[in-house]
Image (cartoon, coloured by chain):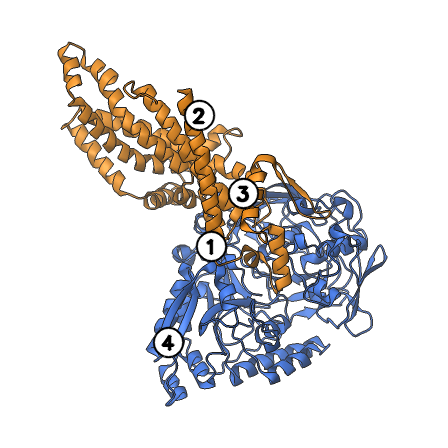
Amino acid sequence: MRLKIGALTVSALSVALVASGCSETKNESGGGEAKTNVQAGAISYDANDNKAPAPAVEGSNKGGTIGVMLPDGFEHLDPARNYVNVQQLAGQLLYRTLNGYREDGKGNLKVIGDLAENPGTDVNKDCKVWEFKLRTGVKYEDGSPVTANDVGYGIARSFSGDLSEGPHYIQQWLADSNDYNGKYKGPYNGGGDLPPGVTVPDAQTIRFTFAKPHCDMPYAATMPTSAPVPKAKDTKAEYDRKVFSSGPYKIKSYQLGNSMVLERNPNWDPNTDPLRTAYPDGFKFDFTLQADQASERIVADAAADQSTLTWVNVPAPVLPKTTTAGVKERVVQGPTQYTWYYYINNQRIKDLKVRQALNVALDKEAVLKAIGGSAAGIPATTLMSPTVAGFKKYDVFNVPPAGDKAKVKELLGSTTPPPLVLAYANTPRRAAQAEAARKSLEAAGFKVTTKSIDSTNYYTEVGRKDNQYDLYLGGWGSDWPDAGTVIPPLFDGRQITPTGNQNLAYFNDDSVNAEIDRIQSLTDAAARQTAWAALDEKIMKDFAPVIPTNYDNNYTLIGSKVGNAFVSDAFGQTGLSNIFVKP
Amino acid sequence: MVRFVIRRLLLAVTTLFAISIITFLLFFAVPASPAEVMCGKNCSPTQVAQTEHRLGIDQPILKQYGQFVKGVFVGRTYGEGDFVRECPAPCLGYSYRNDELVTETLKRTVPVTVSIVVGAAIMWLVIGVSLGMMSALRRGTIFDRIAIGVSLVGASLQVYFLGLVLLLLLVYSTGLLPAPSYTPFTENPGKWAVGLILPWITLGFLNSALYARLSRAQMLETLSEDYVRTARAKGLTKRKVHTRHALRAAITPIITIAGLDIGASLGGTVITESIFGLQGLGRSAVRAVVELNLPIVLATVLLAALFIVVANIIVDVLYAVVDPRVRLS
């Protein structure tokens, strides 16, 4: 998943989407705890795992209100339009989805059934037909039952071009086309209430039939698209502001860009919900504060803010205050699903030795320091983020993060590298990173010219196949814990088009393309994960098409009365489903 | 007077039309598409085109502008099929970011900015003008010197410095004041005032420094006029000369500047709103520019222009009221 443009400039909302993580925690000098992860990313069919209610949290307390500070607020909460990590975390409080992630903050993450009794049945064992049985007794906020038809209708309306901001996996798989709404355009434009390929044999069962195998369906079913929406309650564009709750909370008040207050949904039954403990009586979201103000307030820990947390990274000027006693214990940090790369334009830099030399020359520490150092991330050596299942740590070049000038010379030998154009989005953070990168590359003997691009146009510009740049920064995060949402979009050369590319290195190799096809055909998740990790290393070892720069890090704060706050490995931000207010 | 006001209003309407056309043209000169900015992951060209269609930016600019103007006066219908939405007049469109009616965004953000500016303006006018006038009347005294010194310091400071220092001292370190926030006046006047006291103090102090210097200079100049001496020679008391003659003349240029300052500030006190975390018009505008959110950009630019134009008209009328020498023609 590429970061949304807004994140380049505003940094308030990173588009996240689902990934997975795992975690062994360790202390870092920056305060709080940083995670280094090796995730298994299991899809669990174990009855115990799928059993409701959700396991009780040790030391938990029921009651109180959790405050959440998030600059500028949500773009969308309508499940058909919800694709941003913090929006998805808020959405979990309001609606159930077919599947979900069970996490305990100790590195255990499993995909289990949420509305569904289990993560889905692969009916013919070919990943083409998937069936989900809904739990009984799940109710909406008005006490009416949640039905499979409502899930189908929710997916049907997500085909509408008017609600296109959400994830499109299930739609594309059903339509067997990236242009998923070419024929069926959803119920608002003459289509039926169920999209082609979706059937509802009975009120508790929904079945998906795909033209091709999609073994990732249990992961795709964790996304908000699979939330139920009863047709009678579909207020179309207005649904974004007042979703009809099937989760533990409902919207009490919502002022866009200002605040949102959630109160308990009296018809939510914990005995039907394996994921949410819903300890607080309510949540209060404050969208008015910027990162520095929100962080300062939580650092100060005044009585009114003690049960409040931030959903925005602590900005550099406030970082020093987060290392002091009394504050550092309240830092919540851990890796997100994003890895940042300097993409090398392989159409222009064709010499492998030069690409390898660039990898060795870049001072990743300096590039990271320009945006906050260890609080912002840790230097990367792989394509996948550590939060992706099957992640295998390797370092092809085995040089310090600050680079190795001697090795650059050794790699280049008598080759004179061409002058390079390094493009960057014209925001203060990206400009600082570009300058750090330029300095380190020039110190290693490269000639580098930097080129500023308007941040709103950055990905459009570098996404043109004929762009005239050699190096440019870009972030990508997996949508779920499988590198199938990382390697193919970034390194399958057959997907390169004249404009709008995700493969920003413009890397195209037949052997890699063939291996991608082979791995995607594997139905065994563990085998697939191992193969992706091997391909990750092979790409860097044999082609070095990018410079992995850093793994992204979440670094936020909580008040002293917030309990069970940890970075969700699935969403890269503090989860709310099992949080509580300390007495 | 009526003819004057009508003429100014017609000029204001023409100005706003011109600004709306320029903003429209500038927006489309930017080499980026809001549809691409909005479009999610793996967005195919077809989906980008769909998004452009939904936003209405696939139409020729002239047609889009015509629809915009029509929407302002008679409202507009958005969407197709069963997904039709009525946008009642004055329709300024929907935000590209979150589909909120722009008029709703303005209803939310304008009161914040107005509250900041009105409170601060009262502060800077009362304190600044009084201080300047008193300083002029006590020229050369210790009071005058201190007032001039303080106003020099105030005039040298910036909002982002003083605001942050006050936040640190009064909110984060000592907790003497609650963190700035906006509560509608109609909901709780006390909370409204307490939440805005810091922005008022900051803006009020900085601007009152400028107004103190300006008022002092104007008053000194007026006091040296022949008619003031004549009034004193005729036996009028100092107090009468100062209040009835000198003050009235000295205040007219201050009214002009205050009107323009207030008008411009109402268009968005971006830095103040950002420092104190208040969601006013200025912050909304900055965000809209970053996100290529044309409906919000257009609405805020037009509103800012409207504030300045209206402030000008009010200043012109007040000018005549305060100074009978000025005739409206």
Q: Colour of chain B?
A: orange
Q: Residues within 10 Å of mark 4 (few under 14, many from 20)?
A: many
Tell me where residue B271 appears, x and y as whole percent.
39, 45
Q: Is residue A31 left or right of residue A224?
A: left
Label 4 element class: helix
Name of the residue lying farthest toward the bottom: A414
Of all chains, the one bearing label 4 is: A
Q: Is residue B53 left or right of residue A173?
A: left
Q: Is residue A476 above or below residue B104?
A: below
Reading the chain from its start, which is encountered first: label 4 or label 3?
3
- Residue type at tag 1: Ala
Give yes or no for contact between labels 3 and 1 (Cβ–Cβ under 8 Å).
no
- Residue type at tag 2: Ile
Q: In this rendering, do the residues under marks 1 and 2 share a single chain? A: yes
- Residue type at tag 4: Leu
Q: Nearer the viewer, mark 1 or mark 4?
A: 1
Q: Which residue is mark 1?
A: B29
Distance in Å between CA atoms under marks 3 and 1: 32 Å
Distance in Å between CA atoms under marks 1 and 4: 35 Å
